[in-house]
Amino acid sequence: MSSEFDIVVAGAGIAGLTAALTAARLGRRPLVLTGEVLGGNLISIERVEGYPGFPEGVAGYELCPMAQAQAAEAGAEFESTSLQRLDCGAGKFHLVTGEGEIAARAVILAMGSQIRKLGVPGEERLAGKGVSHCASCDAPMLRGAAAAVVGGGDSAMQEALVLAQHASRVIVFHRGEALEGQQAFRERVAAEPKIEVRCACVVEEILGDPVVSAVRVRSRTASESVEVAAVFAYAGLAANTGFLEGRVRLDDAGRIVTDTALNAGTPGLFAAGSVRSGWAGRAVASAGEGAAAALAAERFLAEAAAPGRAG
């Protein structure tokens, strides 16, 4: 593999894959650093809704491989490693990955996010023993049992609906006053008799030995233990930008600050998807930003190569 590329895309969620596809179709030679798992958070989503071309929705674990195949056919290259360090000098970006060093003329940051941990006792100890982030993976093992979902956004509601197909009872614990996210999901959750929603309720501890047996929760009026066989945490996302501190501007949530053209502060550096401050929180928005970032990178490269310009 060459060590120098027109465009390097860091991340292989739908934003990064769409950026790679767009860049390749523009005649550039993009390299995608996929990380350990191609597809990002979407890979565990049973059904992505509101995505054009899929009126009935599409599984994230199907959408992302389709996007990768399309990008590869257009000419994008892929490497199963992650971006660990980014430096800019002499008109090029120098990237350090788990497999070595790469040079790029433009970089699109699309590393995505990871599900934010609850930070409560029992969460780490019982990970994989009832604490999960993938309802489509683990719901079939919960037939006849109760499950807890922590969170009140789209992901939490989607996972609660998946769990309700298998579990005997699904309890959604949300610290807010009401569920958030899309109205369509709120209506479906309200119509599902197996789902109980408890708002203004905080999970303080996950109990069990050797597997999850209950959660300790606190409401305005009391603290109690609720018996469940599994806990699915969807209490927000944390952007995978820790290695960029001091190199790009981050907002208070750790997301990359860009202008409206997705420029990340350094000429040739762009950001797209859930790592970007102001991201709309939808898969279709991530895809759109990926395409827009690739178009912006193409304009940057074309202008840099124009006569009379440094390139």
Image (cartoon, helix red, strand yellow):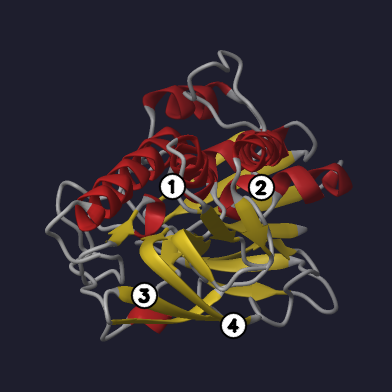
Mark number, residue 152: 1
Q: CA distance from mark 4 to mark 1?
A: 21 Å
Q: CA distance from mark 4 to mark 3?
A: 42 Å
Mark nearest the camera among 1 and 3 is 3
Q: Quadrant of the C terminus?
A: bottom left
The reply, left or right, for residue 56 in relation to residue 96 is: right
Q: CA distance from mark 1 to mark 3?
A: 40 Å
| Dot 3: element | strand
The reply, left or right, for residue 223 in relation to residue 70 is: left
Q: CA distance from mark 2 to mark 1?
A: 20 Å
Give percent across and percent down for residue 24.
50, 42
* Identity of the residue drawn at 74% across and 43% down: 136
Residue placed under numbered mark 4 in the picture: 121
| Dot 4: element | loop
**First in sequence: mark 4 vs mark 1:** 4
* Identity of the residue drawn at 82% across and 79% down: 209
Q: Quadrant of residue 290?
A: top left
Give percent across and percent down for residue 264.
23, 63
Are discs 4 and 2 less than 8 Å apart at CB?
Answer: no
Mark number, residue 43: 2
Q: Residues within 10 Å of mark 3 (few under 14, many from 20)?
A: many
Q: Is residue 111 visible?
A: no
Mark number, residue 93: 3
Q: Quadrant of the N terminus?
A: bottom right
Q: CA distance from mark 2 to mark 3?
A: 29 Å
Q: Residues within 10 Å of mark 1 (few under 14, many from 20)?
A: many
The amino acid sitting under disc 3 is Phe
> Which one is in front, 279 or 135?
279
**First in sequence: mark 1 vs mark 3:** 3
